[in-house]
Image (cartoon, grey):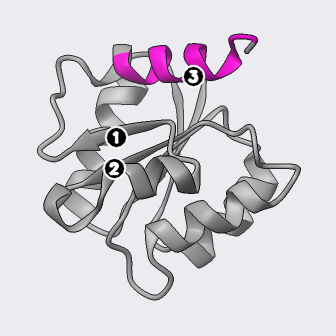
Amino acid sequence: MDILIIEDDPIDRKLVGVVLTTSGHVVHARTSAEEAIEAIATYRPDLILLDLKLPGMSGLELLRKLKSLPDYRDLPVAVVTAFPELFRKDALVEAGCDAFLVKPINTRTLAQQVVEIAARKSEPD
Protein backbone atom coordinates (compact mmCIF):
# COMPACT_ATOMS: atom_id res chain seq x y z
CA MET A 1 0.00 0.00 0.00
CA ASP A 2 1.22 3.54 -0.77
CA ILE A 3 1.04 5.74 2.31
CA LEU A 4 1.65 9.46 2.58
CA ILE A 5 2.82 10.70 5.97
CA ILE A 6 2.27 14.40 6.57
CA GLU A 7 4.26 15.16 9.71
CA ASP A 8 6.48 18.13 10.57
CA ASP A 9 8.30 16.43 13.46
CA PRO A 10 11.35 14.67 11.99
CA ILE A 11 11.52 11.99 14.71
CA ASP A 12 7.84 11.04 14.41
CA ARG A 13 8.05 11.13 10.60
CA LYS A 14 11.07 8.82 10.54
CA LEU A 15 9.67 6.41 13.15
CA VAL A 16 6.33 5.99 11.36
CA GLY A 17 8.10 5.71 8.01
CA VAL A 18 10.43 2.97 9.24
CA VAL A 19 7.60 0.99 10.85
CA LEU A 20 5.47 1.10 7.72
CA THR A 21 8.32 0.48 5.28
CA THR A 22 9.45 -2.52 7.34
CA SER A 23 5.90 -3.84 7.06
CA GLY A 24 6.10 -3.72 3.26
CA HIS A 25 4.37 -0.41 2.54
CA VAL A 26 5.66 2.26 0.17
CA VAL A 27 6.00 5.46 2.18
CA HIS A 28 6.19 9.07 1.05
CA ALA A 29 6.62 11.80 3.65
CA ARG A 30 6.02 15.54 3.61
CA THR A 31 6.39 18.18 6.31
CA SER A 32 3.58 20.61 5.42
CA ALA A 33 0.10 20.70 3.95
CA GLU A 34 1.34 22.64 0.95
CA GLU A 35 3.96 19.97 0.13
CA ALA A 36 1.38 17.26 0.73
CA ILE A 37 -1.04 18.62 -1.86
CA GLU A 38 1.58 18.17 -4.58
CA ALA A 39 2.52 14.72 -3.31
CA ILE A 40 -1.11 13.57 -3.26
CA ALA A 41 -1.54 14.56 -6.89
CA THR A 42 1.74 12.88 -7.85
CA TYR A 43 1.61 9.63 -5.86
CA ARG A 44 -2.15 9.09 -5.40
CA PRO A 45 -1.58 7.34 -2.04
CA ASP A 46 -3.88 4.63 -0.75
CA LEU A 47 -3.92 6.24 2.70
CA ILE A 48 -2.81 9.47 4.36
CA LEU A 49 -1.52 9.77 7.91
CA LEU A 50 -2.08 13.44 8.71
CA ASP A 51 -0.65 15.30 11.68
CA LEU A 52 -3.08 17.99 12.77
CA LYS A 53 -0.50 20.52 13.98
CA LEU A 54 1.44 21.58 10.91
CA PRO A 55 3.20 24.80 9.99
CA GLY A 56 1.14 27.06 7.74
CA MET A 57 -2.09 25.32 6.80
CA SER A 58 -3.24 23.07 9.64
CA GLY A 59 -3.96 19.39 9.17
CA LEU A 60 -7.65 20.06 9.79
CA GLU A 61 -7.71 22.69 7.03
CA LEU A 62 -5.98 20.26 4.65
CA LEU A 63 -8.45 17.52 5.56
CA ARG A 64 -11.40 19.79 4.78
CA LYS A 65 -9.81 20.87 1.51
CA LEU A 66 -9.13 17.28 0.38
CA LYS A 67 -12.60 16.05 1.26
CA SER A 68 -14.16 18.94 -0.67
CA LEU A 69 -12.47 17.81 -3.90
CA PRO A 70 -14.20 15.00 -5.85
CA ASP A 71 -10.88 13.35 -6.80
CA TYR A 72 -9.84 12.99 -3.15
CA ARG A 73 -13.15 12.67 -1.31
CA ASP A 74 -12.78 8.88 -0.93
CA LEU A 75 -9.09 8.92 -0.01
CA PRO A 76 -8.75 7.45 3.51
CA VAL A 77 -7.25 9.91 5.99
CA ALA A 78 -6.19 9.01 9.52
CA VAL A 79 -5.46 12.07 11.62
CA VAL A 80 -2.64 11.91 14.13
CA THR A 81 -2.10 14.23 17.06
CA ALA A 82 -0.26 14.52 20.34
CA PHE A 83 -2.94 16.97 21.51
CA PRO A 84 -6.29 15.14 21.31
CA GLU A 85 -7.84 17.58 23.79
CA LEU A 86 -7.46 20.40 21.23
CA PHE A 87 -9.57 18.67 18.58
CA ARG A 88 -13.17 17.51 18.92
CA LYS A 89 -13.62 14.09 17.36
CA ASP A 90 -17.06 15.00 16.01
CA ALA A 91 -15.56 17.98 14.16
CA LEU A 92 -12.85 15.73 12.69
CA VAL A 93 -15.39 13.15 11.56
CA GLU A 94 -17.53 15.91 10.06
CA ALA A 95 -14.44 17.16 8.17
CA GLY A 96 -13.90 13.68 6.70
CA CYS A 97 -11.52 11.95 9.11
CA ASP A 98 -11.61 8.16 8.74
CA ALA A 99 -9.59 7.33 11.85
CA PHE A 100 -8.02 9.10 14.81
CA LEU A 101 -4.59 8.10 16.18
CA VAL A 102 -3.03 9.63 19.30
CA LYS A 103 0.71 10.07 19.74
CA PRO A 104 2.81 8.42 20.83
CA ILE A 105 2.00 5.98 18.05
CA ASN A 106 1.99 2.33 19.03
CA THR A 107 4.64 0.94 16.69
CA ARG A 108 3.51 -2.64 17.35
CA THR A 109 0.01 -2.07 16.01
CA LEU A 110 0.46 0.76 13.49
CA ALA A 111 0.98 -1.40 10.39
CA GLN A 112 -2.17 -3.40 11.10
CA GLN A 113 -4.13 -0.24 11.92
CA VAL A 114 -3.38 1.36 8.54
CA VAL A 115 -4.43 -1.81 6.72
CA GLU A 116 -7.71 -1.87 8.67
CA ILE A 117 -8.40 1.84 8.04
CA ALA A 118 -7.86 1.43 4.29
CA ALA A 119 -9.99 -1.75 4.23
CA ARG A 120 -12.88 -0.05 6.06
CA LYS A 121 -12.82 2.82 3.60
CA SER A 122 -12.92 0.48 0.60
CA GLU A 123 -15.91 -1.51 1.89
CA PRO A 124 -19.20 -0.75 0.11
CA ASP A 125 -21.66 1.32 2.13
Residue 51 position, x and y percent, is 36, 59
Q: For this view, does 81 lie left or right of residue 98?
A: left
**Label 1: how many Cα within 10 Å (few below 14, some 14–19, many 20+):** some
Could you tell which of marks 2 and 3 lies nearer the N-terminus? 2
Amino acid type for the residue under numbered disc 2: Lys
Camera-side residue of 111 and 86: 86
Q: Which element type, helix, strand or loop, lies under badge 2?
A: helix
Q: Which residue is mark 3?
A: 118
Give how far apart the Cα atoms at labels 2 and 3 are: 19 Å
**Label 2: how many Cα within 10 Å (few below 14, some 14–19, many 20+):** some
Q: Which element type, helix, strand or loop, lies under badge 1?
A: strand
Residue 87 position, x and y percent, is 28, 63
Q: Which residues are magenta?
A: 113-124
Q: From the image, which quarter does the N terminus lie in?
A: top right
Amino acid type for the residue under numbered disc 3: Ala
- Can residue 44 be seen here? yes
Q: Mainly helix, strand or loop, the magenta region?
A: helix
What residue is drawn where x is 57% and y is 22%?
118
> Measured along the vertical axis of the image, is residue 112 above or below residue 70?
above
Q: Which residue is mark 1?
A: 100
Camera-side residue of 93 and 108: 93
What residue is drawn where x is 30% and y is 58%?
88
What residue is drawn where x is 45% and y is 67%?
59
Residue 81 position, x and y percent, is 25, 56
Label number found at residue 42 = none
Q: From the image, which quarter does the C terminus lie in?
A: top right
> Measured along the vertical axis of the image, is residue 68 above or below residue 18?
below
Give how far apart the Cα atoms at labels 3 and 1 are: 13 Å
- Can residue 50 be seen here? no
